[in-house]
Image (cartoon, rainbow, N blue to C red):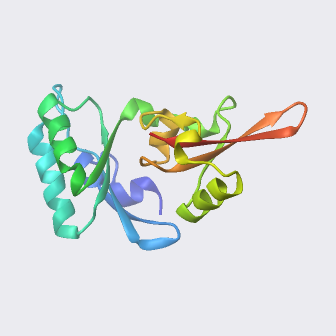
Amino acid sequence: MTFTQKYGENPGRDSLTMLVGKGDDDTDQLFVFFPEDTKEKVSLKAITVITDRMKDEAVTNAILVVKVDLNPYAKQAVQEFSDSFRIEHFKESEMLVDITKHTLVPKHIVLSENEKAELLKRYRLKETQLPRIQLNDPVARYYGMKRGQVVKIVRPSETAGRYVTYRICL
């Protein structure tokens, strides 16, 4: 089914809302919202409508794709709801290019908790000894990384063939 068959010629942004499951675990669900933006910033009311829908569907993760930024009250509401919900917001302009496909961005692989524990044990490290990647780093945002998660970064190397490093998200 093509996009136009599913959503029509000129779909409204609200009709694009979708609920998706993680590839290997359909119980881990995520909402993708395209709130109707005005020329102003996205409001607190839009955030409360989204969180109410998330409560109704028992979903704790969401992505907002907005044309303009959130207003200060909406940003504060997203922060306040962070105990119950994880809501990430991206501007449409950030979503036009898949940054992980860029030639200058090395391959990133987010490790599971078991892989992280194995890594720390193998190299006899504490979490604080790992190099860091910021939570607001574009690649960390792309992969939806949370504090404490570790990412494996594989870069090409002229001498070794490939160079592997690990970073912890803070």
Quarter that holds the C terminus: top left
Q: Residue 48 placed where, x, y %?
A: 11, 49
Q: Can residue 12 be spotted in the picture?
A: no
Is 9 positioned to the left or the right of 128 in the image? left
Q: Residue 2 placed where, x, y %?
A: 47, 58
Q: Residue 162 placed where, x, y %?
A: 82, 40
Examine the rendered structure and indicate whether residue 162 appears above or below residue 159.
below
The mark tally for this picture is 0
Q: Residue at x 53, y 36 (%)?
A: 132
Nearer-the-camera pick, 111 or 32: 111
- Residue farthest left in this picture: 45
Examine the rendered structure and indicate whether residue 76 appears above or below residue 123.
above
Q: Residue at x 38, y 60 (%)?
A: 6
Nearer-the-camera pick, 110 or 169: 169
Is 68 positioned to the left or the right of 45 in the image? right
Q: Residue at x 42, y 46 (%)?
A: 147
